[in-house]
Image (tube, rainbow, N blue to C red):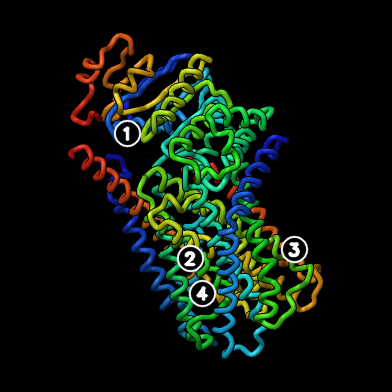
Amino acid sequence: MTWRDREPVALIGLSALTMELAIAAALIYAPTERVMGPVQRILYFHVPAAAMAFVAFGVTFGASVVYLATSHPVSDAVACAAAEVGELLAALVLLTGMLWARAAWNTWWTWDPRLTTMLVLWLIYAGYLLVRRSVEDEARRARYAAVVGILGFADVPIVVMSIRWWRTIHPAVFDEKGVHMEPRMLVALLVSLVAFALLFVLLLVVRVRLSKLRDEVESLRRSVL
Amino acid sequence: MALSGVDLRLARGQVYVLLGPNGAGKTTLIRILAMLEQPSAGHVRIAGIDARRRPIEVRRLIGAVLHQSLLYGDLTAEENLLLYARLYDLDDARKRVRETLDGIGLGHRATDPVRTLSRGMRQCLSVARAVLHTPHVLLLDEPYSGLDCRSALYVSRTIERAARGGCAVLLTTHELDRGLQVGDRLGILSGGRMLAEMWAREVSPAALRRLYPGALVDA
Amino acid sequence: MSMDVWRKAWALVGKDLALEWRTRESFLVMLLFGAIVGAVLGIAFELRVDGAGDVAPGALWVALAFSGVLGLGRSMAREQEDGCLEGLMLAPVDGSCVYLAKAAANALSMLGVGLVLLPLFSVLFGVNLLRPGLLVVLLLGAAGLSGVGTLLSTMVPHTRAREALLPVLLLPAVVPLVIGAVRATAGVASGQSLSAVAAWLRLMAAFDLVLGAAACLLYACVTEG
């Protein structure tokens, strides 16, 4: 058994701890925003989740490239895990975005550039996961998924750009040139970002471990039958 | 079907017949040799060239007949062959295609869509397609299945001619008699492993039948 | 690329055009479907939208994308029918050459459909879409749809979901292209010059180039095995 085969206890602990910290920072430490009120606190989860969703899709892209170059099954498992976690985070972004939109603009959905971008990415990677479910043969599944993972990520900058141009009339939620925030808000945001990063790594590790275990069970079953 | 430990050597001018029941891995082997599938381990070398390193060069040396005809049903016999002639960079494509079609007795139906041809004719055309570029290695997966006598005769003649021209031929079949008749060397594949290899002239049909695995022997 | 790659690609394009010309089946289906989408959208919007002309560019591109999905599926089905695509893979031709030829042939039939839909949509939605500038938009749009779609359509027959997977993967991926196309079409249709919509054309061209190049490189990964 290598370290990778064991339950990542330390990481779970660390991740749980920082997440508690992030919640405390977001809900207690950070001051209430004047215009928006308490609803603004959703930002401390919305923004880190969005950032990590992009990171996750980037990891899927990188792992897909590695898979096509090496055919190593672990890179496929990483690509899959990152896409699943990315979808989860993107869904979180969409949900928190909708809650915010309800409070801020009195509508559940708005074609805000960021929200729209996230929706399109969510759809693209939903397709990625669907391809994974839809191919029986392992090598082929990994290959096809890698192709979609790479193509999808090549699309990301164009999606971001196109939607930003498309919606230029809409008010940008944040200033384009940087975040002008109260220092304590920034601290809360950064803590939350760290917490989400750790959560992402944790979920990734757990998920990769799960697929390794599944493969092992599968090969054991095959050798018995 | 997974293959393991199969070491197959084809010699120029030799017809190698791969026998084996359904699911023995014959098709997989052919597909790997035709570079349609990548083996998870092991390699294919043709005329000393590693197939994975220089695929285009190796493809030029291979001709293959698979289960499916590889012909466009809505194109004519001539158009199908012309397309392949161009893909293989053949000189005098038109003339060569004409001669080939006359050779299989399809000269008068050259401009009919392949869809309208009989199964036997289509198989002949499929074989003609595979040898159009005079390959160094000819792979045929069950070329005789469902053929009438005349088409089967054409297939046998093409194999013979290719071998005489120095081509290495590998064909699969589950018909033992046919294998003995056309093959120089026989190999029996079962469960992804090579059970036995022998020279056709040194084995009697009865002996071959005894070697053949299981009750899957076709009449 | 050397001369003979182009010669082979041309032979492959010629083959697709000959097949299409012989039966005309997929072109007619695409055309009819495009018209149906236009009619359905027209009916659906009729009572709710004041200026039907405003939705014409959007309707046109939805119709083109949908009929494109249909055409891509048909073209690949023809390629798979008697193992023809494998026949092409047996030949000493680069995967990228096969990709370029298939993509060009698919783009041509989409372009053909687009040319017929322009006058039709002009009538249905009461706008003037018969402007030469739209040829450029159509060309860039067809190239992008076909560039991504050709890769995906080669993949989906080997999945359990089959053709149903194609729109699910293709449509989210082409969102930026459709945004650019709709904007450019709307601009040109309202009498603007091509240079006035150059930003959108550039966006479409960027999509075509980036995703086309990615698809071209990835094509070999979906054809083997």
Q: Is residue C46 among the parts visible in the rendering?
A: yes
- Chain on which label 1 sits: B
* Residue assigned mark 1: B2
Return the residue nearer the eye: A93 or C211.
C211
* Residue assigned mark 4: A185
Could you say where residue C213 lies in the image, as x and y percent from the top left?
Answer: 63, 49
Q: In this view, does B28 lie to the left or right of A65?
A: left
What is the distance, in whole Å, between disc 4 and disc 2 at their CAs? 32 Å
Q: Residues within 10 Å of mark 4 (few under 14, many from 20)?
A: many
Q: What residue type is labelled 4?
A: Met
- Chain on which label 2 sits: A
Could you say where residue C195 lies in the image, as x and y percent from the top left?
Answer: 81, 68
Q: Give the label, 1 or 2, closer to the camera.
A: 1
Mark 1–mark 3 CB contact (< 8 Å): no
- Chain on which label 3 sits: C
Q: How crowded is mark 1: few (under 14 residues within 10 Å), some or many (20 or more)?
A: few
Could you say where residue A7 lies in the image, as x and y percent from the top left?
Answer: 28, 50
Q: Is residue A52 among the parts visible in the rendering?
A: no
* Residue assigned mark 3: C136
For the residue labelled by badge 1, is the local secondary structure a helix, a strand or a loop?
Answer: loop
Q: In which quarter of the image is residue C118?
A: bottom right
- Chain on which label 4 sits: A
Q: What residue type is labelled 1?
A: Ala
* Residue assigned mark 2: A123
Q: Which amino acid does label 3 sit on?
A: Val
Q: Residues within 10 Å of mark 3 (few under 14, many from 20)?
A: some
Q: Which amino acid does label 2 sit on?
A: Leu
Q: Give the label, 3 or 2, closer to the camera.
A: 3
What is the distance, in whole Å, between disc 3 and disc 4 at their CAs? 49 Å
Q: On the rendered image, what quadrant is the N terminus of chain B found in?
A: top left
Residue depicted at 46% across the width and 53% down the height: C156
What is the distance, in whole Å, between disc 4 and disc 1 at their CAs? 60 Å
